[in-house]
Amino acid sequence: MTVDRPQVEQLAPGVLVVRYEWAEHLDPSWQADLLERAAAAAAAGPVALVFVLAERIRDIAPTIRVFWRTITGDRRYRIGAVAVVTRSWAVEVAAGGFGVTNALSGAEVRVKTFRDEPSAVAWAASVTRPATVAASG
């Protein structure tokens, strides 16, 4: 099956998982569906994004980080956490820098990298909607 765009799904309240198969899908021009869903989810509370990157994605372009820094600062989306699932050291470093940039700018967005999707989703749910997770768990 050919994946021709990022695949977005909501796996828990306020937790949007996005699977990227190709580096070009990280480009801001491919994010409309995700942003629409994030804005809708934000009506019920903070939102966490879980970016699951295919192993072939080995780096993140600076323009992508700038785009997401703008989005995390936009209150329409209420992004409180970003989890990045990757096996790439370069992506881990970029994600860490993204987290520091958000913290220094005053954005209340937690950023963390993971090696597997289930751990990332569990963390994102616990950070974004801790009361919901505690009540259901």
Image (cartoon, grey):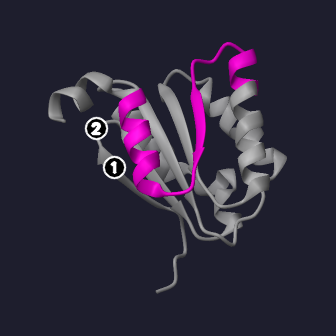
Q: Which mark is residue 31?
A: none
Q: Label 2 sits on what residue type?
A: Pro
C-alpha span from label 2 to label 1: 7 Å
- Please name the residue shown 16% across and 27% down the image: 135
Task: Name the spot of residue 82 as percent of width and height, x first.
Answer: 55, 38
Q: Label 1 sits on what residue type?
A: Gln
Position above or below: 62 against 55: above
Task: Name the spot of residue 136 as percent of width and height, x first.
Answer: 16, 34
Task: Name the spot of residue 47 as percent of width and height, x first.
Answer: 42, 32
- Please name the residue shown 77% across and 35% down the image: 97
The residue segment tinted magenta is 101-127
- Please name the residue shown 75% across and 16% down the image: 104
Determine which quarter of the picture holds residue 132. top left
Is 3 left, or right, of 86 in this rendering?
A: left
- Please name the residue shown 32% across and 25% down the image: 130
Residue 60 visible in the shown view: no
Out of 122 and 75, give the one closest to the viewer. 122
Q: Which mark is residue 10?
A: 1
Q: Among all residues in the image, which is located at the extreme bottom?
A: 1
**Is the residue under label 1 in contact with that under label 2 (CB below 8 Å)?**
yes
Q: Which mark is residue 13?
A: 2
Q: Quadrant of the C terminus?
A: top left
